[in-house]
């Protein structure tokens, strides 16, 4: 069986790894072993961050809706309970957008809920 020299494929693999760590600090951007370790952590944090982003946005929408509702004399919890009872199926993202951009429309929605 012929001998396989892995110089080219190993070099390509190493270069690909080091392109991922471009911009990292210190030896993590140049040293292969440190780069591998840094990528393991970075990619796991990125995965968690994608989940966290969804939580953060929902919390932001809730705060924006609540702020608009306080100006109209009601609270977030009463409003959400009212929307469920009135069978209004608008999600929080759209509600917060309406509250920010079209306060008159949001006031009409609130009056239907009350």
Image (cartoon, rainbow, N blue to C red):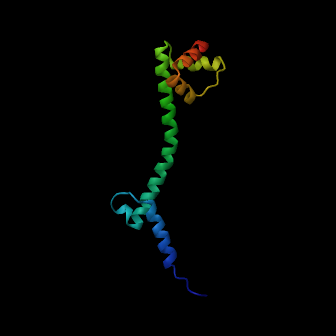
Vertical arrangement, residue 22 with respect to residue 62, above or below: below
Vertical arrangement, residue 45 with respect to residue 10, above or below: above
- State which quadrant residue 110 falls in: top right
Picture coordinates of residue 113 (x, y %)? Answer: 60, 15
Q: Nearer the viewer, residue 34 or 67?
A: 67
Q: Nearer the viewer, residue 96 or 56?
A: 96
- Rendered residue at 50%/29% (across/down): 61
- Rendered residue at 61%/19% (across/down): 83
Q: Residue furthest right?
A: 87
Q: Residue furthest bottom?
A: 1
Which part of the image, by quadrant, shows the C terminus?
top right
Vertical arrangement, residue 49 with respect to residue 57, above or below: below
Picture coordinates of residue 20 (x, y %)? Answer: 46, 60
- Rendered residue at 46%/68% (across/down): 15
Q: Nearer the viewer, residue 107 or 29?
A: 107
Which part of the image, by quadrant, shows the N terminus?
bottom right
């Amino acid at each position: 069986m012929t001998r396989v020299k892995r110089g080219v494929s190993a070099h390509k693999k190493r270069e690909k790894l080091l392109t991922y760590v471009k911009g990292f600090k210190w030896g993590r951007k140049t040293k292969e072993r440190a780069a591998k370790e840094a990528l393991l952590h970075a990619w796991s944090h990125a995965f968690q961050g994608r989940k966290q982003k969804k939580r953060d946005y929902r919390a932001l929408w809730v705060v924006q809706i609540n702020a608009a509702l306080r100006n109209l004399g009601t609270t977030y919890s009463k409003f959400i309970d009212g929307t469920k009872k009135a069978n209004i199926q608008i999600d929080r993202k759209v509600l917060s957008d309406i509250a920010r951009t079209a306060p008159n429309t949001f006031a009409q929605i609130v009056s239907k809920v009350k």
